[in-house]
Structures are given as structure tokens and as C-alpha cells.
């Protein structure tokens, strides 16, 4: 095992300037011995010893130690009144880092908060920050900071690009769970506090996860995560009462079904007292759900919610519901409308422990989509937004695509749901509507590849997801810098070069793939590489309507599908108007001729040619920049990225040429610069 | 098991007018007791008893019996001088059916010939022909009448549309070989005399077929086929000396490799003394071959031929060789040229026990292709033509596509290789060049579906393949009638209706799929259903080049790939000329504007619209015709075909609409009849 690859951003690399830390960092006292506190203790000892390259003296519970770590309950007496007030006004996950020349205190409102505080301290040291005069109060902006594993019991990972599952192998839960423990460490280090450990598509055998066949082992996994402050959830099969319960129905209003789930919940909580709850994909892409019984999503989710309520469990109900048997001939149905049309009318009918999980865009994690108009549109229903750290449509961890800028753009989008300032960021933080639960969830990008994420640089997306979810005010650049230093070292050339690569990578990927927000020009099924008409005559509701004259989807209210009306003003008018619609989303909302002039001064067709030639050339730039780091990066990680960049280049070439040829054949409009179009 | 489905054309249905046969058919004497003679005996007894609905008296070797059956060796004394002369001037598989009121004689030049004669007799009775005054001499026109199974040891069948393999299951050769025996019966009934029992793509474990791990069981299979006159071949992995022989090379000129194969051949023949030989796919679609060692196909095949020569074994060397990593940007490479370019220069260099197997067209079993110019182009090299009974590109045994008319068209094609009259039929019969071995081979369409071929009506392709290969002068209609009567009964309504369905089905399928010979507009990989651009930007060399102005592949010598020059005159000029190129192959040879006028008086685009609307409507016609037979056909077979026809209709609808929409979007030329184009 190559530890450098494996350790991601927790390298704990010896720092150059040890002096500034020497005085403080020679003894630690950690108060308490719950599993999470123990984890904090082990971690801080391990991290400081390595970074400072010296043994740290670990004391018993001694309030005079140089570093004291613990909960406010244990260490409140070391704080002044202001500090106590500030901490108490923070949420349960808030903590304080306070230091003087004599002592450094890491004091949290809970065990979990202590763990976060310890990682904050470790991070400061690894980033070589001055810690001599700290007074940092921190609490996460989002309550839910969740990851969804799409792992299957056979060891495969749906939409996984980093090898196989770390949870399952050959139809069994892995015996050696040390890698799961390490995963939990990484998650806690960036503040992830919830995880669902099986694919939202719950297949036959996985349906038994909520039975005694698997619960004893899942309990072990829950214990591992608990020690790192991560609450365990399971994806469940809505048809379980029939599939494994011997009932003849799964009707959510049927008394026997309700009882079955109530008993089931009780059984699960016997094994896992702090079980988070269920993640449910129902009535979506052929998964069973309440529709079978003429019930709706509220009926379905509330029934589960009632079962979980006595135990404080939650139902995370996915809103990825659309007609996946659409007829391409049917121009009136618009998949983009589906989530809003399905769920908005149900607002107010959901139990307070039901949380709707809504993908960031109305389609499916394309490189460019507008923000889903459903987010924030249900004042009386808990919502969390769903991102995809796994790069399904954004290069599959072969191509470089640092996603933090995309997510930030989504979070900063102002819905105007309650007037100006109703950003997605504030909505999912629960600051616009009085949500009981809210936050962010995402599909994980890890697997059993030695480096966890296939492409080493894709580690930055996992890191950044956690950091951004904790604190959305962090910039993409700050996050990139933090990650680079922790991962590769505090060297200016490295930081500058990789930061530049990361920050430009989303634009580069967009340049050479589907243009102007139209999406979906990918190889069906696989979702990697170009296939311009691949989804054009399909049943998936994913069309671009390119013809001899132009391209784009008319979603206006006057002549199109009326999707624009799902937005509040002024977004509605902006998107609906050809004049005001931003270039980058033009083809998502409008059908336009190839010669239509964009706001950037180019015709659509020339923009397509230009961005595709440019995007390919930019990949060459990425390669050059990476190659310039050869002397700075260990061979294994250097070659891993180098190899991926070469594959990205081949992919970009294929995209460039297929897109350009496709549109040239359709339009016969020449490139103004006479570059080669085949 | 439903025997009616299973029995295909060997139903042995009681006939209505028994009287005409009563006198003759009450006793049989079969001479000899070799396995093949025994098979003949069992079959004739079984068939006549069932068809005549009475027990037949089976006598010992009694030359006075009403029916006498045996080889000329045993029964020559019952023949007159003319008969003996005629038989002796026939080949080894020739036989005589001769009858008077007193006796009916079935006398063959070999055991195998006797079996064929017996099946001829059975067929005459099932067809209710007068047999009171027969004097029929028959011999097959083609020496090789072969089937290739593309079966894998895991039980799958490459390009199989009739369930799984009848030979293999779960990584093993099937224990119960009764179904293999029945398959052998069917093959002998239509004169098939050779079979290769494993996929030409020889994977890892199948490479061991030629070792003692599998030979004992393959010997059993060979014995089963031997008893029905069918010689067994195996597909081999050219890299076997390395993969299983422990050598460091598979270079055909290496002495140790030659020795390895010589020893291997000797070993195989110890198990199977009449082993047919090897079928080889080399240097094609990533299969290993002589190119690795800078050797050519002659080097590769001759080396194997030398190993097999002492045992009279043959090498069947496939010519399906092309660049399957082509760059779609490269307009100069033409896959259609590949077989000819590769093999023609090697003429004369092959051993006399090497036989080249050449697909009927230059591409790959499309619904419409020109005939491969390689067939007949090598006067000094044995050749067999390869058809595909499996409907890979012709509806996959869901859609009805009776292929005999297509094959007949190929066989009747006059290559002019040695002046007029150099038809493919005469070439592969060995009548144009002095081939030592020649004939016809084909990919089988059977699997373990109860009815063998998925669609019951697809049985007609297997039946017809055998009959046509024996006697290419039979018309598609004659073969259809024979098959229908034997399969469904001698009822005029049935015969007329199904015959009409079969005979029109190829045209119907062509109507709604890829137009005017251009091919390849299918779903990649699967090869079923439309995907107009599916292979357009691929590495497979399969392009249609449709753009805003027109469509087609320029293969002329002046402006195109020069493929037309591979044909002899006058075919070369005919195909090369826009004026003379037949409509149905126009887009195979020429790029033309959408408004180009066809010889049929329509523009290309209007022809596309017309044939696609028509083709879909014709499927409705097929459904109507089949439905009219409800009262005549047993429920199981009726519903099987009914179900397939409904699926065909859905497929035809998808083809019609995608093709029409695709070309309308590209051309914006309206349908003259204003029918719905989406």
C-alpha cells in the first residue's frame, strides 16, 4: 500500500518551521473517553507527533496541560463568561479554539464538536498558521452534511470511478473494516456528519440490510462511524414489506404495512440506537413506490416517518422523480419540470422528520444546469440539496473537474423566493424557511482504489465538499489552497500550479463538452465521452433538438414547455427572455439559430467551434502545468495524474472533433478561423 | 417441453391420404449397422410410423423387403447398370431414390448419403408427394455445408437470440447431450455435414478445448454428430502455444510452435479420428494472429495446415479482417476494402487444406450489401462463403426476416471473374476455379429456447440454409413451402399466408431500417433498433456521412475510396457510375444530395420517407396475416409469433420515426404526402 496516495489530505507531513509550535505542543490532555473523544485523542496525538516530528506527551485529565481538549461540559470552567455565552449560542457542533502563550484550548459543545475542533487545530498546524493567539468560534452552517454511497453488495459502485466498494465485496460486507474506519476519519476531518452506506437503488439482497441477516454487521459499521461523529443511514426498498416481509402489499396506507415498518424500525434501533434513518428513492427509474397504490410521495414518506419518529429517525426522500419512459416524439413533456410538478403541490403535507433531497439542477448533474426551482419552493417542507461528488457527467475522475466553483455558483443563486437574498445557501441552511432539518447531501466519489478517488486530484472534490458544506463562505480558491498544502505540501510552486489547474478545470471541461447548457451529448449508459445524438431519440427526456437551422430546448412559457414559470421573478423573466437569458444557459431555455448572436459577441456556431478548439488546447495547458511539477511530487501520484491527463486529452480531442463535425455537417457554416473540422 | 415447438420441421404429422403409401410402407429393411445407418433406420421407422399412423414392420437385411435402404456397396446388386453408373458418377454424398409398385430403394454412395436419402423419402411423404414411380438421383452441389456455433463455455451465445447454448452451461459442457443429438438430427435432415461447436472468438477457458481437459467430452459430441453425418470442427486460439502450451511465442514460423501444433493435432485425432479441423479468426477484432510476428495470413494458416495434413484435417481461415481501431476522421481508409486488400495478394500461397471463409458482403451481414469482391478473386485458393443464419443485423429473431431470398441473390450474383456465368453459386461449388474444397458456411441461429430459434418462423432460415446449400437451384418459395408444410401442415391457407409473410419479410425489414444499402444505423453493440449516428463517430469503419446536403459513402475510383475497382468489369463500372449503380446499393457506393432522383423516379429523401412509412404499415400487414391463422396454428406457436410481431411493430415504429425525423431535421425537406414526421 502506498500511504502517500492513501492518506489524501491527512498526510501529517513534518512542517518546516517547528519553532513556533514547540512550546505549546509538547503535551496534551484530552478529557473524556467516549468513542468520539478517543478518536480525537488518537488523531491529535498522531497528527502532532508526525507534523512536529517529535513525541507528544499525553497527559491524563489535567486542566493545566499545554493543550486541553474536551467538551464544554468538562472544561467550561476554563472559559470566561463571554466564551461560554458564545459557545452556548452555537449549535451542538460548535467549538472554540482559544490560545495564549500558556495554553491552547479546544472545547466543543459535544463530542463530535471536539473532534471537529481537533481537526481544525491539526489543519492550522499543517497549514503552518500562527496559533499563538487564537480565538476562533466555529459552527457548521448546515445541519445535514451528508454523503450517499451508491455501493452494492456485489462490490460494485453505481457511477463509481475509483475501483470497487470499500464496504462490500462478492456479495458480503467486508470483513476487514479498517478502510471504513479510515474513511470515517477523512469524513470527520472535513465535518461530514451523516452517511448512507448503500445504493439508493436497493436491489434484491440489499433489501435484507434491515433484517437480522445484516444488521449485526451494519451495527459494527455504525459503531465505526459513530466514533467519528458520522450518523449512519440506510437506503431502503419501498417494497420491503412484500419483498422480505411476506405481506401482499406495500401500500403506505395499509395498516399491516405501517405495522411492519414500525416493527422494523424498532428492530433496527435495537442494533443501532442512533440510527439516522432511511434514504429513499421511490417511484423513480423503475424503483417501487407509493404510486403503485395510487398514493403520493407524502403518503409514502409519512408512513416511514411515523415508524422512525419514536426513535428520532429521519426519512430522506429523493425528489429525482420523472417519466423515464418518455417518448422522444412528445414535445410537451419536459423532464426538467418533473420534480417541481411532482412535489410542490405536496408542500405542508410531510411529517417534520421527512426531508426532501433535491438534486442541484432539474436534470441530472450535468456540467451546466440552472438551479432546481424546487429548492426553496416548499416553505413548509424540510429540504436538502443533493450534489454529486462522483464525476458521473463531469469526466469520471479521468478528466479533471474541480466542482467547488460549480457548487458555489449553485449555493449563491438567488431564488428570490422570499425576495432578494433568498439564496440557495440560506435556504438549505434553514435561514429562509423555518426548516427543522436541512442541509446538503452528495453522492460520494470514493472506492477501493489506493488513492480513494481514482484521480488523485479528485480528492479535492471530496475535501471541498466537506469544507464547503460546513462553511459555504469559503471560496473555491481557499479550499483548493487548504487541500493542496495538506495533500502535497506547502510549496508555492505546487500551490500556484495546482490551484490554477483546479480553478480552471470546470470551465475547461465545459468548453469541450456539451455547449451552452444543453447537456446530455454523452455516451448513453456510460456517460463518458461524446455521443451527440446518443440521448436524442431516447426515452430519458434528454434532448437538444439540433437540426439544420439551430439547436436548443424551448422551455419558455409562450412557445415552449413553460418550465421557466417554475422560477420566481425576476429569474422567471430572465430565463424566459432570449435577450436576458445568460449565454451559458441559453440552449437550456431556448431554441436558437446557429447564427444567433450571443452576448459574448459570437454566433452560437462560432462559439461552439471556439470553445471546443480552446477546451482541447486548455487540456494541453493542464498537462504542461502538471508536468512542470515532476520534481515536486512523488512519482506515484505524479504519474497517476499524468496518466489521467493524457486520457483527458484523448477524450477532449474526441469531444472537440465530434461536436465540431456534427454541427458543421448540420449547419455547413465554416469556422471563421478555418481550423480543421473533419 | 412443448414437442410441437421443439420438433421444428420434423413434426412427422399424420398425413391425410395414407392410402397411396399403404402398400409400400408396411415393411422396411435397412442394411448395415454403422452409427449413421443406425440413425437412418431409427429415423425412417419413427417418421413413417408417425406419419402413416401405423407400426412399420422392420425386417433384417432382406433384399425383398418393400423398402430397402443401404449403401451401394451393400445394395448395388439391386440396381441396373444405368443406375449404378449414375450413382458412381455422383459424389460421395449422392444417393438414389427409386421406386416401383413392388419396392422402394434408398441407396447411397456412403452412410451419410443413405441418411440424406432417408430424409428425402421422409420429406416426400410429409409433403404427400406421389412416391410410386421415383427415379431421383441427388447429390449436394456444395462440398462444405457447414454451421458455426458462436457458443461460449459460460453458456452464452455471441449474437445468439434464442436463449443460451445447447452445448455449454455455467462453464461446463452440458452433461445431458440429448439436445445436441436432436440438433444433429435436424442438421442431417437438411444435409448439413460440418459444424464448429465453439465461438470463433476463443476466450481463455475455451482455449483448453484442444487439451485433455475437454477432449474426452468433445469426443462424445463428435460421436453424436458423426452418427448424423456431421463432421466436428473446433475454433482455436492462434495464441494457444503461449496461452496453454507454455511457449514464449506463437510465431507460425517458429519451429517449436510448429511442433506444438503437430503434437496437438496428433493428440486431437487420437480422440476424434475424423476431426474436421480448425476454424480460425486471427488478427481480427483483437484476436491474436500471425501479424504479431510480422507474418501474414498464409504463414499463419499454412502452419496449422501442416499440422493437420497427416490426418486430412482442414483449416478454415476467416477473412473478416479489418482495422477495428479506425479513426472516423480518416476518410481514406475503407473497411469494405479490407478483406480483398488483405487476402487477394496472397493467392497461391495457401496449402491445399486451407480454406478461406469469406462473409457474403464486404462489411458485416447488413440487411443489404454488395457481394464481397474477394469471392472468386483468388483462383488458386480454396474459398467458402459465410452467411449468417443468426439475424444479428436483420431483426434478431424478433423481427421476421426470411433470409433465403437474400442468400439467393448473393449466390446468383455474376462476378464475371471468368467471364459471364461466373456466379458466386458456381464459384463456391468449385466449378469456376479448381478448388479442392469449397462450399458454404454460416453462423447458426439456434439456442436452448424451446423452439430452438426464438421466433418460430426463424426456423425457416435454418431449414432453408441447409436446403439451399445442398441445392442452390431451389427457389426461396419452394423452400418456404417445404418448410411450412412440414412445420405447420399441408393446408392451403397456412401455406399461402406464411409463404407470403416469409417472402416479403426481407424487403419489409429493409424498408424500415437503413436505406439504399448504407447500413449500420443500428444501436452500437446490441445491433437491434435504430441509432442513426450510433456508428458514425466510431472506430469501426462504418459511416454514412449524412450531412445537411446529402448522404452516402463515396467508394468510386475517381473521388472516393476506390473500392469499386475490386470488382471485375462490368460490375466495376456499374457500381462506379452514379447512373448505373442500382438504387438499392446507391448509398453504399455514392454520396448523393437528398434531392437526387433514383431510378425508381423518387428523390432519395422521398424514397426514405416512403419506404419507412410503408415498411411500418407492412408490419401491420404481417400481423393481420398471422392473426388470420389463429384457428390453424397451435396456441403456443401462434402466440410466440404473435408476440414477436408486436415487438417487430414497436421496433419498426421506432425505426420509421427516428429515420424520418433524423433526415427531416438534416434536410428540412417536407414529405410530399405530409405524413407525420416528429
Image: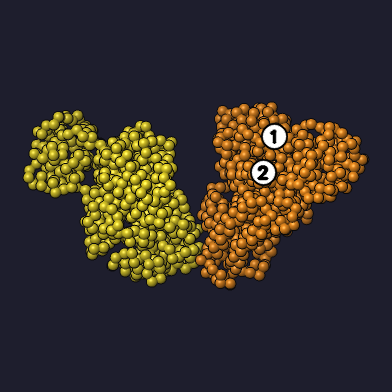
Chain colours: A orange, B yellow
Tell which residue pokes out farthest to the front in this image.
B255
Question: x, y percentage for residue B239?
Answer: 40, 47
Disc 2 from disc 1: Cα separation:
21 Å
User: Where is A490 relative to B64, above or below?
Assistant: below
**Residue A226, quarter of the rendered image:** top right
Q: Which chain does the numbered disc 1 sit on?
A: A
Q: Is residue B365 left or right of residue A188?
A: left
Tell me the residue at 42%/50% (across/down).
B287
Quadrant of res A213? top right
Residue A179 position, x and y percent, is: 65, 38
Q: x, y (%) of residue A504?
A: 68, 59
Give SS at disc 1.
helix
Q: Is residue A88 left or right of residue A257?
A: right
Decide which of A143, A294 is in the foreground and name it.
Answer: A143
Percent position (x, y) of residue B598?
Answer: 37, 67
Residue A224 numbered tag: 1
Above or below, comparing residue A14 to residue B575 in the picture: above
Secondary structure beneath dot 2 equals: helix
* Front in this rendered view, residue B525 or B325: B325
- Furthest toward the left, the residue is B81
Q: Select label 2 or label 1 by which is in front.
A: 2
Residue at 85% across, 32% down: A61
Specify the quadrant of the image occupied by residue B381.
bottom left
Front-lying residue, B350 or A19: A19
Q: Are marks 2 and 1 on the same chain?
A: yes
Q: Kindly identify which numbered label has been placed on residue B609.
A: none
Which of disc 1 and disc 2 is earlier in sequence?
2
Q: Residue at x 55, y 64 (%)?
A: A660
The front one of B621 and A258 is A258
* Numbered circles on residues, count: 2
Where is the N terminus of chain B found, in terms of image quarters? top left
Residue behind mark 2: A3
Amino acid at each position: 500500500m502506498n500511504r502517500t496516495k492513501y492518506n489524501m489530505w491527512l498526510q501529517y507531513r513534518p512542517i518546516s518551521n517547528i519553532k513556533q509550535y514547540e512550546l505549546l505542543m509538547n503535551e496534551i490532555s484530552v478529557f473524556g473517553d467516549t468513542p468520539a473523544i478517543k478518536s480525537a485523542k488518537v488523531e491529535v496525538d498522531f497528527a502532532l507527533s508526525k507534523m512536529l516530528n517529535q513525541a507528544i506527551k499525553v497527559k491524563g485529565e489535567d486542566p493545566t496541560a499545554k493543550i486541553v481538549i474536551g467538551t464544554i461540559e468538562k472544561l467550561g470552567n476554563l472559559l470566561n463568561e463571554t466564551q461560554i455565552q458564545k459557545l452556548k449560542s452555537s449549535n451542538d457542533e460548535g467549538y472554540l479554539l482559544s490560545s495564549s502563550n500558556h495554553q491552547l484550548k479546544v472545547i466543543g459543545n459535544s463530542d463530535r464538536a471536539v473532534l471537529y475542533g481537533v481537526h481544525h487545530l491539526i489543519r492550522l498546524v499543517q497549514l503552518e498558521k500562527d496559533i499563538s493567539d487564537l480565538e476562533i468560534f466555529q459552527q457548521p452552517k448546515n445541519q445535514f452534511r451528508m454523503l450517499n454511497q451508491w455501493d452494492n453488495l456485489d462490490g460494485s459502485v453505481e457511477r463509481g470511478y475509483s475501483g470497487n466498494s470499500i464496504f462490500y465485496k462478492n456479495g458480503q460486507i467486508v470483513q476487514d473494516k479498517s478502510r471504513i474506519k479510515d474513511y470515517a476519519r477523512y469524513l470527520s476531518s472535513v465535518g461530514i456528519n451523516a452517511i448512507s452506506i448503500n445504493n439508493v437503488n436497493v436491489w434484491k439482497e440489499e433489501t435484507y440490510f434491515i433484517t437480522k441477516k445484516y444488521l449485526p454487521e451494519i451495527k459494527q459499521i455504525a459503531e465505526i462511524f459513530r466514533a467519528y461523529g458520522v450518523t449512519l443511514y440506510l437506503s431502503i426498498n419501498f417494497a420491503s414489506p412484500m419483498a422480505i416481509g411476506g405481506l401482499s402489499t406495500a401500500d403506505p396506507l395499509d395498516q399491516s404495512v405501517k405495522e411492519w415498518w414500525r416493527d422494523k424500525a424498532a428492530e433496527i434501533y435495537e442494533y443501532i440506537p442512533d440510527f439516522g434513518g432511511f434514504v429513499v428513492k421511490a417511484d423513480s427509474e423503475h424503483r417501487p413506490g407509493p404510486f403503485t397504490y395510487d398514493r403520493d410521495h407524502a403518503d409514502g414518506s409519512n408512513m416511514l416517518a411515523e415508524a422512525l419518529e419514536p426513535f428520532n429517525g429521519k426519512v430522506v426522500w429523493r425528489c429525482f422523480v420523472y417519466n423515464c419512459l418518455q417518448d422522444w416524439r412528445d414535445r410537451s413533456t419536459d423532464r426538467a419540470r418533473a420534480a417541481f410538478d411532482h412535489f410542490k403541490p405536496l408542500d405542508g403535507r410531510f411529517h417534520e422528520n421527512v426531508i426532501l433531497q433535491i438534486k442541484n439542477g432539474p436534470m441530472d448533474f450535468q456540467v451546466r444546469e440552472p438551479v432546481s426551482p424546487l429548492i426553496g419552493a416548499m416553505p413548509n417542507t424540510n429540504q436538502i440539496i443533493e450534489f454529486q461528488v462522483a464525476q458521473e457527467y463531469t469526466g469520471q475522475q479521468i478528466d479533471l473537474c474541480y466542482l467547488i466553483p460549480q457548487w458555489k455558483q449553485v449555493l449563491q443563486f438567488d431564488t428570490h423566493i422570499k425576495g432578494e437574498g433568498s439564496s440557495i445557501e440560506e435556504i438549505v441552511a434553514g435561514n429562509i424557511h423555518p426548516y427543522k432539518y436541512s442541509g446538503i447531501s452528495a453522492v460520494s466519489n470514493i472506492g477501493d482504489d489506493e488513492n480513494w478517488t481514482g484521480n488523485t486530484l479528485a480528492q479535492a472534490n471530496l475535501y471541498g465538499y466537506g469544507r464547503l458544506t460546513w462553511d459555504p463562505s469559503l471560496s473555491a480558491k481557499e479550499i483548493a489552497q487548504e487541500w493542496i498544502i495538506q495533500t502535497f505540501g506547502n510549496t508555492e510552486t505546487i500551490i500556484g500550479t495546482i490551484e490554477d489547474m483546479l480553478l480552471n478545470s470546470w470551465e475547461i471541461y465545459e468548453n469541450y463538452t456539451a455547449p451552452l447548457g444543453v447537456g446530455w451529448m454523452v455516451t448513453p449508459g456510460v456517460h463518458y465521452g461524446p455521443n451527440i445524438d446518443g440521448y436524442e431519440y431516447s426515452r430519458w427526456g434528454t434532448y437538444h433538438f439540433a437540426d439544420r437551422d439551430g439547436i436548443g430546448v424551448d422551455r419558455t412559457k409562450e412557445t415552449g414547455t413553460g418550465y421557466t414559470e417554475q422560477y420566481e421573478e425576476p429569474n422567471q423573466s430572465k430565463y424566459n427572455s432570449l435577450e436576458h437569458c445568460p449565454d451559458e444557459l441559453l440552449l437550456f431555455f431556448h431554441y436558437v439559430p446557429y447564427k444567433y448572436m450571443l452576448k459574448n459577441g459570437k454566433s452560437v456556431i462560432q462559439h461552439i467551434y471556439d470553445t471546443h478548439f480552446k477546451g482541447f488546447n486548455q487540456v494541453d495547458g493542464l498537462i504542461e502545468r502538471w508536468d512542470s511539477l515532476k520534481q515536486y511530487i512523488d512519482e506515484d501520484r505524479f504519474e497517476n495524474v499524468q496518466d489521467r491527463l493524457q486520457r483527458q486529452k484523448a477524450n477532449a480531442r474526441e469531444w472537440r472533433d465530434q461536436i465540431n463535425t456534427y454541427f458543421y455537417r448540420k449547419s455547413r457554416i465554416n469556422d471563421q478561423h478555418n481550423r480543421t473540422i473533419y
